[in-house]
Image (tube, rainbow, N blue to C red):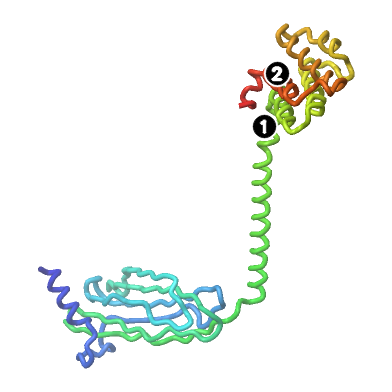
Amino acid sequence: MKKAVISLIFSICLNPIYGWPQTNSQTAEIQISAQISSPSIRMGDTLAYIITLTWPGEQGRYLIEELAPPLLENLHLLGTKTELSFFQENRTNYTRKEYKFQLAADSIGPARIEVLTINYYDTKTDNSDSFVASAYEVKVKATSPAGQRFLWFLLAVAILLALGYVLRLYRKIKKPTADSSATKTLEQRALEKASNLSGEDAKNALTQLKDIVIEYLESKTGQNLTGKTTNEILASLDGFENGKRETLRQVLEECDQARFNPGLTGQNLAKATVEKFNKLLEPEGKELVE
């Protein structure tokens, strides 16, 4: 019931009605002050517009109409904040209510904060009245040379940081490729090279395949096999199983045949020889083949 009565009084007293009798605000105990943080600002800076209401007694002594932002010219509102505080002076308790408007300029030149009217209702005297906060003229100036230099400095720093980030990202992307190559097995590297022979003619494919086989066997055994005959190479493979040695013999002999008798070597034979070498490297190179 009490809330309903207060709402009724508030709606009657605070709705703007032209010709409504008002008490003289000079005799009211509530006081108002308005101020701006500076009469001029530079582009990029902010301006504070503060309205302060102060009255003796508790918060509920005065009912203040909800305050809308002021009308602005060449300024725009960044944010608002309302603060309520209490203090004591000469053994009297006071209530203070502050409305803070944070403003920024739209362009260089004159700016203006228009007149702002604040309606209130005094619950003690049963009177309604209003305050009028005067208009303010504000001058908006260009950014200072020092400020411009600082902005350019910040831009340069931002560009350098961005370039550093891109470089680190590039290295991060490239690094796994190098690492993955280092962690590949001998079989995987040999299979990778053999897979590039599909577009070659029979003679070239088998000539390159022999180089791949010899390079693989040298890495596997630690011996120098370059320039040796097929029989000499096979004699050096003591650690290989008989089945693998036999497959290597067939592959090497077919490569020799393509070199010395290319007319007897067709594309199908070359393809079969490469596949024979691929199967030899399984299961170590199976993952790469798949």
Q: Name the residue under label 2.
A: 276
Q: Are marks 2 and 1 in contact (CB under 8 Å)?
A: no
At horizontal 29% and vertical 72% (from top left) the residue drawn is 95
Q: Position of residue 69 (x, y in %)?
A: 37, 77
- Splitting the image into 4 quarters, where does residue 220 fall? top right
| Vertical side of 200 occupied by 73: above or below | below
Within 10 Å of disc 2 (Cα), the crowding (few <14, some 14-19, many 20+) is some
Q: Is residue 1 left or right of residue 254?
A: left
Residue 157 vertical position relative to residue 73 in the rendered view, above or below: above
Residue at x 40%, y 76% (from the top left corner): 50
Looking at this rendering, what residue extends furthest in the bottom direction? 19
- As shown in the figure, which amino acid type bears the numbered disc 1? Ser
User: Residue 101 falls in which quadrant of the image?
Assistant: bottom left
Foreground: disc 2 or disc 1 = 2
Residue occupying image coordinates x 67% and y 54%: 163
Q: Label for residue 163?
A: none
| Relative image position of residue 244 (x, y in whole percent) | 72, 11
- Residue wearing tag 1: 180
Query: Foreground residue, 128 or 276?
Result: 276
Q: How far across and how far down the image is residue 60, in percent?
A: 22, 71
